[in-house]
Image: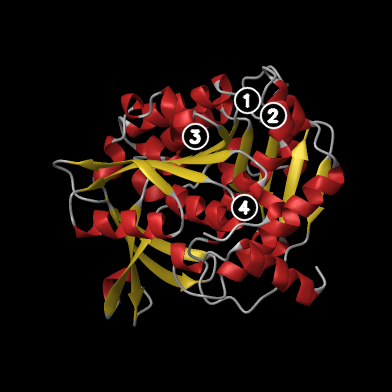
Amino acid sequence: MKTTTAEGEGGVVLCVGEALVDLLGEGGDRIESAALFRPAPGGAPANAAVAAARAGAPVRFAGCVGRDAFGRLLREALAGAGVDCAWLLRHPERATTLAFVMPAGVGDLGFEFFRGADAALSPADLPAAAFAGVAAVGCGGVALSAEPSRAATLAVLAAARQHGAAAVFDVNWRPRLWPGEAEGAARSREAVAACDVLKCNAGELALLAGPDGDLVARARGLLAGPDGPGPVAAAVTLGEEGAVWITAGGVVRHPGFKVGAVDAVGAGDCFTGYLLAGLARLTAGARSRPGAVRAALAELAADRITELLTRCNAAAALSTTRPGGMGAMPDGAEVDAWRHRSGA
């Protein structure tokens, strides 16, 4: 694993949730008409774990796969990227989760899930030892759509606060996993209420806060004070238009980067991974004081957030210039070199 001083000074990043195999469709414009499917290791939290590791952070991943070839593929891919897989479990009966993915257009992806072992992760699978030395925790919305992974996700967010780590929740809305939008939105709000930083795109913000009104005002309606419950900051991604960091006291925007994108699979996960690595470093001085991490997140200086968003956006943009999820994640040295060449 390559490391950089930019992120290597922070604590451990823990990503929790689904590790699955994306079967990437080729030779058609819809999943049902694809000529072939190519397996690629994926899953939003697993992709984010690889991105955080390539950003230079020490990373652990906790999840559940099957005792099958796809499970082996995922473990090898994560471990090969430098991710600690001690908490990646193998279910004795359930198969590894699969997702058929058709990149119908950049930013407009079709998904069909065949749910398996990822949903079997339970709170008991994540004892206190999993959080030792952890500075930032990331989990997402797919795990909320089934039990016991829903309970595990909420328990992880609660444990992050208890252990002085920044808890980041990525909505990662996948409507096909839910019986209806109302239930999915309600379950997502439960996780939002338990996190420190909400990460979402504009469509997911509309799901949580309604489609009408100013984006900043709607995001602020989801925020809470340092004593919670609820996030103290929101990172809203806007695709090629960049991202915005919103707190009760300020707004920081970065316009993003225009690149020759060929595949958007995993771009948001790449942003999340770099965000987790950056937050682990930026809150390093606050972890020894109870409640100080949330205050630190709410009060991060604008120049530090600008640098963080620039790096996250640069990494996400680079990831779209190559196909696949985990395999598309750039390392920190590559991101920094690309920024230097482009003057960003």
Position of residue 284 measured from the top left corner of the image (x, y, whole percent): 69, 34
Q: Which of marks 3 and 4 is in front?
A: 4
Name the amino acid, label 3. Ser
Q: Tell me: 77 left or right of 259.
A: left
Distance between mark 1 and mark 2 Cα atoms: 6 Å
Which residue is identified by label 3? Answer: 188
**Which label's residue is closer to the chain start, 2 or 3?**
3
Q: Nearer the viewer, mark 3 or mark 1?
A: 1
Q: Tell me: 217 left or right of 12.
A: right
Name the amino acid, label 2. Leu
**Which label's residue is closer to the chain start, 1 or 2?**
2
Which residue is identified by label 1? Answer: 230
Position of residue 4 measured from the top left corner of the image (x, y, whole percent): 66, 57
Which residue is identified by label 2? Answer: 223
196, 292: nearer the viewer: 292
Which secondary structure lies at badge 2?
A: loop
Name the amino acid, label 4. Tyr
